[in-house]
Image (spheres, rainbow, N blue to C red):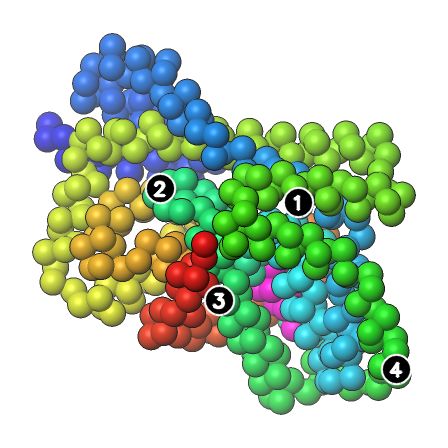
Amino acid sequence: MPNEIIGALGFAALAVLVLLGMPIGFAFMFTGLGGLLLLRGMDTALGFARFGPFGATESTVLTVLPLFILMGNFLIVSGTATELFDAAYKWVGRFRGGLAYATILGVFGFSVISGSSAASSATFGRVALPEMKARGYNDKLSSGTIAAGATMDILVPPSITAVLYGLITETSIGKVLIAGFLPGFVVMASYFVVIFVLLRWKPGWAPSHAVAVTWRERFASLKGILPTLVIMMLVMGTIYLGVATPTEAAAVGAVCVFALVAVRGKLSKAVMSSTFRGTMESTVMVLVILIGASVFTVFLTVSGVAQTAASHVINLGLSPIQFYIVLILLYIFLGMFLDPLAMMLITLPFLMPVVRTLGWDPVWFGIFIIRMAGIGLITPPLGLNVYVLKGVAPGVKLNDMWIGVAPFICADMVTLALFYAFPDIILVLPRMMK
């Protein structure tokens, strides 16, 4: 049997295992080892099973992962999310749909120091959704705003997904992190437009109510979020200026957030235990996926299927914009069934050669991939953000949530067009880095 056929069967086996519910890391691992067994024999497969995990996890750059995860976990218990939401509401609450606008602003602020989209969805599901329900907001608008807004968390630094993209493609992690800032603002602005248009079309979805807030109260609300802003500037500013590596900056950020929790009197044995346990569980999960993916990648390389697929794509003669549209459709489809990391690990081995052939900047392409991964988080039937939100808001119908995120997905299509037409939205900050 030709090696390429075995490689294609490996993809089919991987899809079957994932659909059967096997964790993606183990599905990668078993499929890869089985393929190596067929292609190179027992000795090669067992040898790689013995030494492969060390090669996949020996890089010191990987230490940035648990540090960013730890920083986000401490942030969740610090009460910052509530302060961000309250401050945002004091500034935009006087507009119709003020709570929805405040949610988008609050999630964006939470994103600059969190890095976990699921955490944002769950946190603001607890913080913002009860307020919106109490004020008579339509469930479609409120749930759609929270679930879609939380997708900014994997785009805006510090993004764990950006770190993983840099590791997988050997692209500068610092540049990929910094590149997410301006696109994050563009996505936030597009979501504001969605809310504005929806409330022009369906004004009853957000009853109008006056918010009596003085300018003194508005500025006073910023005091509570000042520590978060300082930590964010410290972490990302040191990376941007070249003062610290992403790992060093993440370590400083984790210590600062730890101190913030302690100063606010929210540090306890239970908090420490749950925070460190959650960090270890998330880190181990990512490492298992990376180990499994490394085995699967070697299998694809040995089989030649990745190179063959890349050459076929190149020989199709698609123009760059046609290929861009095909990628959007591909990732929308994959996002229906796979989580962001799995999407990247499956597609990047054969896409990166095509990207280099087209002359696309890998940093720009990374932000595109990350944005597509974010869209996948609100795309049915998987839509992780939607199910996380459903877990903390059982009273909201799942169907209303899917309807609620649909307009935001349409806005994402517009922002993707802007990213292609104006690549400097993504690249201007990385080019200025020291």
Quadrant where the N terminus sits is top left
Residue under label 4, please give it: 214
State whether the magenta stretch is mostly helix, strand or loop: helix
Measured in 3D between alpha carbons, the distance from the residue under mark 2 to the one under mark 1, in whole angstroms, is 24 Å
Residue under label 1, please give it: 253
Give the amino acid at mark 4. Thr
Furthest residue in direction bottom, as rendered: 200
Residue 272 falls within the magenta-colored stretch:
no
Badge 1 vs badge 4, beta-carbon distance below 8 Å = no
User: Which class describes the residues within 10 Å of circle 3: few (<14), some (14-19), or many (20+)?
Assistant: many
Residue 203 drawn at (x, y percent)? 68, 87
Residue under label 3, please give it: 183
Residue 201 drawn at (x, y percent)? 60, 88
Q: Residue 423 falls in which quadrant of the image?
A: bottom left
Measured in 3D between alpha carbons, the distance from the residue under mark 3 to the one under mark 1, in whole angstroms, is 23 Å
Q: Which residues are magenta?
A: 141-150
Measured in 3D between alpha carbons, the distance from the residue under mark 1 to the one under mark 4, in whole angstroms, is 33 Å
